[in-house]
Image: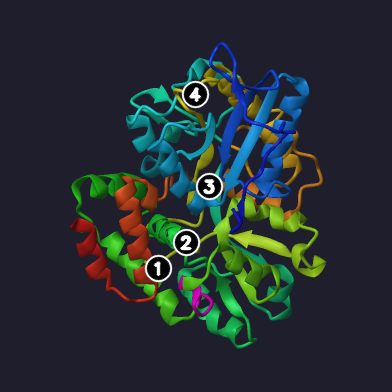
Amino acid sequence: MKRILVLFLAAVMLFGAAACSPSGQPANGGKTVIKVFSNLPDRTTGQGLVEQKIFDQYIAENPNVEIQVEALDDEAYKIKMKAYASGTSLPDLISVWGQPSFLDGYIDAGLIAELNPGDYSEYGFVEGSLAGFSKDGKLYGLPRNTDMIAFYYNQKLFSDNNWSIPTTYDELLALAPKIAATGISPVAMDGNDKWPISIFITDLLVKIGGTAYQPETLKAISGGDFSHPMYAEAARLLQDAYDANLFQPGFEQQDYGTAQNLFINGQAAMFYMGSWEMSMANNQEIDPEIRENIRAFTMPVVSGGVGVATDIAAWNGGGHSVIAKSPVKDEAVKLLNYIYKPENWTKIAWENNVCMSAQDFSQYKTGSETPVQLQLIDIFAGATSISGTTINDLGSADFKTKFEDLSQQISIKSITPEGAINALAD
């Protein structure tokens, strides 16, 4: 997820151009070559580490296979994936997001291989997690994670300054000037990439509309009618955050890595990001006093909203799919299935404190979970409802671009809530 552009080749590559075997499968010194395009460029920490560990295992167990990994960060990945889709030299196994805005176009173009749902009956996928990777009753990918958005905070900093964890949105905004008075930013926000701001709006919509969020939003996107009052209210609340200086100065021009660094370097009291960042608590490069005091809370309730504290913004996001016309399609499906054996992705991800998988991970608890890891488990387990796909990803790719652009504009008050609503209707 970090802003790193890396080309990583997993396994030993032989020099020279790869020949083709008689079957048409790419071969390198007699090996079957599987080309993987991944959105996990950091192969030493986080989910990239988990993915690489699994690939290394697969190679050890299948010495006739070579895995070549090209890995870019999210935004660069999406741009290059479009380029791949328009050409003929596609990879074999790709990272995907189980959201209409990303996956549907590739499915409709016939680029993604259909999978057999029966193959995964014993894989322990949580209820509903495959929905975003399915279309018209057919399965086209598998989800890596159960993602949830949260405010990470420095517990010691809060305790030393007698700051209370806000239970309402008004309390969150009122806390901002108290934090700023100490010379640090209240919340580190990745505003440059825009999607975190869109998720912030989703978070607000869940607290305003409760379980009505997703059905109302699907209807609004389908009909181009965002006149339901919860959308304008969420926009106004986001602009209240701007007025309260909740986010760091210039947040709209600062990316993921910059926002994260503000938090882990003690320059921000909180960091708004997904549950995958639970791994910060195990990052030995972070000052121990900060690392050991990382905790999390979810969006506080909104005055007048029907959503309760246990209605949360959570979804099943990233995953993998196989390219339909891959010359090594069968081998790529084998690798996909191997990744998602519970003893692989789920176990290794949990033991490395990386993320909550989209499968049942309860059997892999170690007893050495970090406090923030346990907090996030409890929050998710105690949820009365979850949002499902965030608003920016519920529609087409064009809707995603428009909504994320408008989210950023709303966040810095360069457009009014009413202006944004009208723009969505265009």
Tell me if residue 76 comes above or below residue 114 in the rendering. Answer: below
Q: At which x and y percent is residue 416?
A: 27, 73
Tag 3: Cα neighbours inside 10 Å, few (<14), some, or many (≥20)? Answer: some
Number of numbered discs on residues: 4
**Type of amino acid at the residue the image marks with label 1:** Ser
Q: Nearer the viewer, residue 169 or 266?
A: 266
Circle nearer the viewer, 4 or 3: 4
Q: Residue furthest top?
A: 22
Could you tell me the amino acid type at mark 2? Asp
Pointer 1 residue: 303
Query: Which element carries disc 3, helix, strand or loop?
Result: loop
Q: Which amino acid type corresponds to the residue marked 3 in the rendered image?
A: Ala
The residue where tag 4 is placed is: 326
Q: Which of the 4 quarters of the picture holds residue 207?
A: bottom left
Badge 1 or badge 4: first in the primary sequence: 1
User: Which SS class for mark 1?
Assistant: loop
